Amino acid sequence: MKQDEKYSANVLFAAGREERTMQDRWEETIFHMAEQEQMVMPHSMTDRIEEILCKPKTRRFRMNFKKSIILAAAMVMLISATAVASVGALRERMEAMNREKMEEYFTQIYVSKIGVDNYNRPYTDAERERMSKLREAYENEACFPKGELTMIEKAEEYKGKGVALLGDTTTFFFPDKEMSDEELLQIIDFMHKRDYSLQKMNEMIAAGEVQMPEIEEEEIEATDISILEGDAVYEPTQELTIPYTGDLELDLTIAAGRNELFLAGYNTVHRMEIGSSDSELFFDDFDVETRILAMCQDVNGDVYMALWQWSDESDAESREFAVWVVNKDGELLREIDMSPYMAPERTGYARRMTIGADGYLYLSVAGLKSPKEAQECEILVLDREGNYISRIAPDEYALNLNGGLGVGKDGNVYTCIENYYDPENPERRMGIASLNAKEGTLDEIYYDIMPENTIMIDIIASGAESDFVFWGYNGIFTYNLGDDKAVNVLPVYEAPCDWEGTRYCALCDGRIVVAAASDYRIEEHPLGKRFLAVPEKTCFYYMPGI
């Protein structure tokens, strides 16, 4: 990997605004930056979002989707912010850091397992108000903290006193009681120093003045072989860590079948038994360049694959969206042409799909004909032959292309919903709703069920001991119908692997399976660069949602 490719992913992090962290809406950030810098934004960001989502995020190539989409604007912002900050006492405070200290801040960003700031609890309203005033005092009146926040290596090291940071996952730990001015100033000071160090280190790396700090790779402690060879692998409470021994260079998608996993590479799909470390070829009978976007399996064992195909490998615009159906023996049954449902000027795609108890195929799709003005994504419902049943695009709630779609414990198909973006009220409120395929509407709605500061939820599936289990940017959540809030049963700072950029799915027993790669091979291709997971650097984690 070239120097600029390898390290460009680290050119920015959170903009140092505590109550408006990277957990805030990235849409708001980019459009605000565009307005300030007179940037021209495309009418639709769908293709760009897809490109970002498809790129890997590893310790060697770490570009979280929010960083990458605001990169151009943020570079301008950082330069402007530096010009403002480079005066008086604050400038002296930043420049007083030696290179060793800046490398510490830079490395903390570089090795973080997730691409956003995370918190053990949200700020209180009073803390947010005081934080805003203290920041102004910090920047304009040289009101600096007397000490620094504490750095910890494990979550259990935090004993509830003061403010601490778990650098591995960029998690801030706050005391239960309201924070003092000193503690809030320590957070402000840390974020300013982190942003300054990030900018200065990237400038020095680009100029060849310093080398990228060496990062030691963590050793993976695999699950005992006696467990993998026994029936324990099928227990819904059994955690598993399984380094991959197969040869597939994993791409965008993994999906759960009834008793197996399906893994997508470029132009190929593998099948892997639950608890296995190896995979075998399932299907690769593609005549043209193909990328698998989403998969699911029905009760008969047939596998549905949403995919892109390029009729001309020298022309990226030749991309077409289709759904193929393959039987359990890997034989092609039929191809479903999606062009009748797609707008001619847009490239359709799906990132989630499932088969309901009614036998219908549900797809979370972008690029439909005549989409509702406020909806980027809609649910398209077809029968298993590909005939149109309905489309679902509610007026009162927004759907997210990566916001989950699956069958609940009650047998109904559910999707994630959230409030429409409002710059005057950026609070993100999320929930789930069952789908009425025949009427093309939402049925039962469970809204505002996610804890404060939750960024995104995905994978709707029934849990072993709960009605639902979700994957989210903040960890794994469970939810029972009628409860006030979902419960974060595995905070991201306790996750066993890098969280952002992983491929994930939910098993029938309620466990979340995450495929994480610590290294990627970059391959030049006429249709664009491919980021291929190095098989021997890939590991599968089975995590119970209870």
Image (spheres, helix red, strand yellow):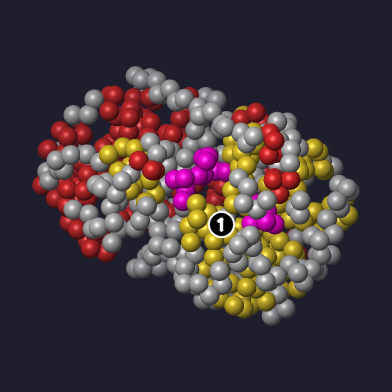
**Left or right, 165 with reference to 332:** left
**Left or right, 281 with reference to 78:** right
Residue 125 lies in magenta, yes or no? Answer: no
**Amino acid at dot 1:** Ile
Quarter of image, res 481: bottom right
**Left or right, 491 with reference to 38:** right
Nearer to us in this view, 317 or 430: 430
Q: Is residue 159 above or below residue 86?
A: below
Image quarter hosting the N terminus:
top right
Residue 211 visible: yes
Start and end of the magenta stretch? 491-510
**Residue drawn at the location 61% of the way across and 38% of the way down:** 241
x and y, in percent, of residue 443 in the image: 62, 78
**Residue drawn at the location 47% of the way across and 48% of the way down:** 492
**Residue drawn at the location 62% of the way across and 73% of the way down:** 434
Nearer to us in this view, 195 or 240: 240
x and y, in percent, of residue 364 in the image: 65, 62
Quarter of image, res 358: bottom right
**Residue drawn at the location 70% of the way across and 75% of the way down:** 437
Q: Is residue 207 above or below residue 255?
A: above
Q: Which residue is label 1 attached to?
A: 546
Q: Residues within 10 Å of mark 1 (few under 14, many from 20)?
A: many
Nearer to us in this view, 94 or 287: 94
x and y, in percent, of residue 71 in the image: 42, 43
Asked which secondary structure carries label 1, the reply is: loop
